[in-house]
Image: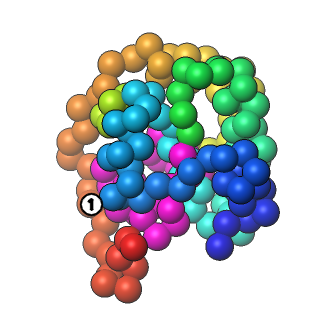
């Protein structure tokens, strides 16, 4: 269950939730996407901080990217496709291809410079990232 702040992003700010299936359609409609990987906000309270900053980033960068929250049931599977080194994370995709990520809560200036850098960077080749093994109970639905 998302925290109140993450739920506010979804319910009141109109940020959609994507999974492995809906991600393809979302990225085909929006060339630049920031995926918000929240993990468990109780275990990673910085997720709530990112949830507060994210609408401000969306406003600052206007229409330069669209944001989606990654469904908690699919985070591990998508993390295997789009690597980052800490939770929470914002992963930038261009036309569905991985460009890079910003992990953990950052200072405002870091967000501004990193998002600008990602918006101007070419998609990265992703290889050699370990794929986590998950049980059938944790399958993405």
The answer to which quarter of the image holds residue 121 is: top left
68 displayed left or right of 80: right
Expressed as whole percent of the image width and height from the top left, the position of residue 35 reads 50, 44
Which residue is depicted at the point 56% across and 51% down?
16
- Percent position (x, y) of residue 44? 66, 61
Q: Which residue is mark 1?
A: 131
- Percent across and percent down for residue 112 are 65, 20
Position of 21 relative to 100 (above/below) = below
| Vertical arrangement, residue 21 with respect to residue 118, above or below | below
Please report the residue visible at 40 percent of the width from the left and 27 percent of the height from the top.
Answer: 31
Quadrant containing the C terminus is: bottom left
Question: In terms of depth relative to the viewer, which is nearer, 120 or 88?
Answer: 120
Q: Residue at x 34, y 36 (%)?
A: 28
- Looking at the image, residue 47 lies above or below residue 39: above
What's the magenta region? Answer: 68-91
Helix, strand or loop at label 1? It is loop
Q: Nearer the viewer, residue 86 or 9?
A: 9
Examine the image and state in which quarter residue 59 appears: top right
Q: Is residue 126 magenta?
A: no
Q: Residues within 10 Å of mark 1 (few under 14, many from 20)?
A: few
Q: Residue at x 26, y 56 (%)?
A: 130
Answer above or below: position of 34 versus 69. Answer: above
38 sits left or right of 70 in the view: right
Residue 21 pos. (x, y %): 33, 58
């Amino acid at each position: 269950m998302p925290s109140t702040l993450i739920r506010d992003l979804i319910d009141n700010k109109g940020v959609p939730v994507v999974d492995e299936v809906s991600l393809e359609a979302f990225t085909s409609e929006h060339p630049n996407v920031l995926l918000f990987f929240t993990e468990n906000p109780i275990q990673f309270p910085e997720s709530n901080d990112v949830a507060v900053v994210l609408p401000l980033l969306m406003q600052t960068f206007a229409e330069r990217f669209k944001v989606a929250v990654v469904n908690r049931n699919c985070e591990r599977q998508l993390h295997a496709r789009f690597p980052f080194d800490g939770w929470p994370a914002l992963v930038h995709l261009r036309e569905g291809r991985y460009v890079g990520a910003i992990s953990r809560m950052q200072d405002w200036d870091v967000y501004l410079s990193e998002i600008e850098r990602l918006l101007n960077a070419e998609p990265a080749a992703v290889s050699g990232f370990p794929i986590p093994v998950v049980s059938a109970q944790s399958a993405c639905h």
